[in-house]
Amino acid sequence: KAAKRREDYLPPDFTVDHIDLKIVLAADATSVSAVLQVTRIGSHERPLCLDGEQLTLKSVEVDGIAWTDYQLSETALTINGVPDSFVLSTVVEIAPAHNTSLEGLYLSDGAFCTQCEAEGFRKITYFLDRPDVLSMYDVTITAPQDEYPQLLSNGNKLASGHNDDGTHWVKWQDPHRKPCYLFALVAGDFDLLTDEFTTQSGRVVALELYVDKGKLNRGQHALDSLKRAMRWDEEVFGLEYDLDVYMIVAVDFFNMGAMENKGLNVFNSKFVLADSETATDDDYFNIESVIAHEYFHNWTGNRVTCRDWFQLSLKEGLTVFRDQIFSETFNSPLATRIKQVKVIREHQFAEDAGPMSHPIRPDEVIEMNNFYTVTVYDKGAEVIRMLWTLLTPEGFKRGMRFYFDRHDGQAVTCDDFVNAMQDANDIDLSLFKRWYGQSGTPRISIAQHGDKLTIGQHTPATADQASKQALLIPLQLEMVPSNGQGESVQLTVALKSETQEVLLPVSSGNRVLSVNSGFSAPVIVEQQASLAELGSILSFAKSDFDRWEASQALFKQAMLANMEGDASVINETAQLMAQFITAEQRNLALLSEVLIPPSVESLVAGLEQVNVDALLNSHKAVYKRVAIECAPMLEKLLAALVLRDEYAYTPEQIVQRKALNTLLKLYSQCQDTSDMLTTLFTNADNMTDTLTALQAAQLGNQSTFESLMQQFEERWQDDPLVLDKWFALHATTERPDILARLQLLMEHKQYTLKNPNRIRAILGSFAFYNTAGLHLSDGSGYRFFTDHLLAIDPVNPQVAARIVTPLLSWRKFDSDRQDKIKFHLTRILDNPQISSDLFEKVSKSLA
Ligand code: DPP
Ligand code: ZN
């Protein structure tokens, strides 16, 4: 597959005003008849070139006449000699039962479903499979009545009926024009949970949640979250739902989290199903945020969509930001922001620094599925957040209204979005636009001379771009009183050039600077604060987020210093943490964040060269040393935490469970907690506490871990979604025989190569979060992992390409490991059947 470039964009030669689809479902041979109203755009003589893959063409007609003047290739149907306006009818056959890529029309546990974003519609019928072709859809689905009583598609149900052969049919019509990536079809036999929502203007919307038989009682939280999201979007952005029905279907086989198909979202069941027994507080949080995310797409994505796939962040960065501020409203803002920033530090900075580095609006793509990245999504959201800061919330909302006034019903670019924001506000955003085109993580340096700061910015070269320019960066600072006396002072500086002088608003005497307060920009601050300064920020900053940041910097400095054999930093850090826990013993929300050290993986992401063995040892040593210093306080706090009411998903209880998790893991570093953990596990009335017991045991107590894990498996062996937690815990355990353990897991009756959740739970968790196992010094981890990648690739290339990521940054490891990783990446690249997904990532990494 050849690379496509953003600059080469051309508008389509034809458009399709209307499509009438008739789909007769059968697992091995589904028939798809499409009648397209086609219109030539502009004056040209070019043929109509339609995308299509893995389709068996049965017939072609133009204006009702059988047509033979066409060429057929593996990826296209080119029809010659067509008039300027005509009706094209095609019939194709497809085989959903053989579609393991989970793109296009496929079977999930016996139900038919579709995934068309980005380019899956071409696996259903011949079409102009690009987001700037917007069409009206009529869809008629036919299938056997008893097996598939529910036949769903986008929009409103127009008619239905029965045939003599035991099949039935339903006709759907979507009153909104849409690109084909938003098409969806589902056919199956589900349990249905219903509700209603009345919009602010009085439209009554039927809400329908379709889940696997027997899972109805796990759907309520998702439905409640949907209603909260609908209300919130009306209240905050004035955006209202625009159809009479909103359907969500949960399926077990799904490549991503969920999909915002117009009026018919399809979800990975992981982001729908929850009850206290089976789901953790984190699961509840994630469900709420993904439900909201897909709902918000109805405006940011569906009503206004992307002109081409290079503009993906237009809808994703914006919609992630919207779901983030939604989540910050209904959950702890501190915990929510920390989650977001961890994703950036652990994954996005690594992407910037690696071979797949790209701007939030990429310039070159081989396989679009590879660009549903943390950069496009999460850094994209940080870029929108900076606009929110620069424009103020009111200015931003004004910009949003203007954007919809100007572009509703259109397919537009990221520039169109920023222009709308600019035109609705009195501001020049031309410099800001560079965030869309420039990749890499900017570095901020600060030099202080009395009350004057010289702030520098520079972005190191990345794999995709050699030279970088200065950006518009809203940098927030907090001047923290170093001894706690007096008020903090906060300021925001809009950086515009490589260096900039700033006069501090108050005297800097006896104050410590907390730079990039609240993570106001996705940058790395280069200046190293001293331990004493970090101690002041940890103790006295007004922003809890900055206090957390200081704790992470302390841990990190201690871990790095310890690697160099310097024990003083570790002692001082441990003392600062012990002082902190004593002073803040009532502030469980903050304690439960501060006492989690940065993960090994986030440290790896932040380092240019990594000595894996030393880092792993140092990480453990520091964690343990802090535990020893804090032990008396931990004991006291834990005693107060174990007694609790019956489970409820309330802010108070969430904080208590989180604190129990953090403190117990820490305490288990220095004490034998087997009895406590076993009691907690046995008495737990909820999955959050159950996992706390398992996680704490996993970190140190091998025999307790094994015995509790066995009990867990006995209890949940028939529930794969719950068992994924068990798979992941095993896969992330540090143990010498980890590969044998993984092999056993993959022989489990619930494991199948065909289900992405299973692969991600075992191999994905291993690759991303078992640094010790992946990087075993004899290279056996690499071999094991790549053997499995080679097996997954032909089944599901999207999943294979997603989990290969940790190997791509091989350049940061020691030369022996480098050679070994390169050897195995080469093995992948040498496979003649390699997918374009894996090819793009692995070839870039080896280049
Ligand atoms: N458009 C989808 C989403 O992000 C892709 N998974 O919601
Ligand atoms: Zn999205």
Image (tube, rainbow, N blue to C red):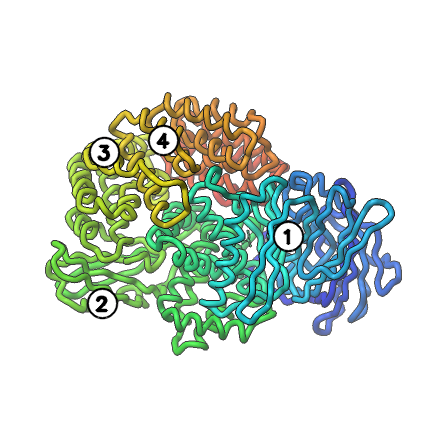
Q: Which residue is mark 2?
A: 501
Q: Residue at the spot x=23%, y=64% of the render?
A: 490
Q: Secondary structure at mark 1?
A: loop
Question: Is disc 3 in contact with disc 4, using a CB cutoff of under 8 Å?
Answer: no
Q: Which residue is mark 3?
A: 635
Is label 4 within 8 A of ligand 1 (CB to nearest ligand atom)? Answer: no
Of the two numbered discs 1 and 3 on the same chain, state the one appearing first in sequence: 1
Q: Residue at the spot x=40%, y=33% of the render?
A: 684
Of the two numbered discs 3 and 2 on the same chain, state the one appearing first in sequence: 2
- Residue 172 can be seen in this image: yes
Looking at this view, is 724 or 224 the one in front?
A: 224
Residue 26 position by quadrant: top right
Of the two numbered discs 2 and 4 on the same chain, state the one appearing first in sequence: 2
Q: Which residue is mark 4?
A: 680
Q: Position of residue 774 (x, y in %)?
A: 43, 31
Q: Position of residue 359 (x, y in %)?
A: 46, 57
For residue 384, side relative to residue 565 (left or right): right
Distance between the alpha carbons at the discs numbered 3 and 2: 49 Å
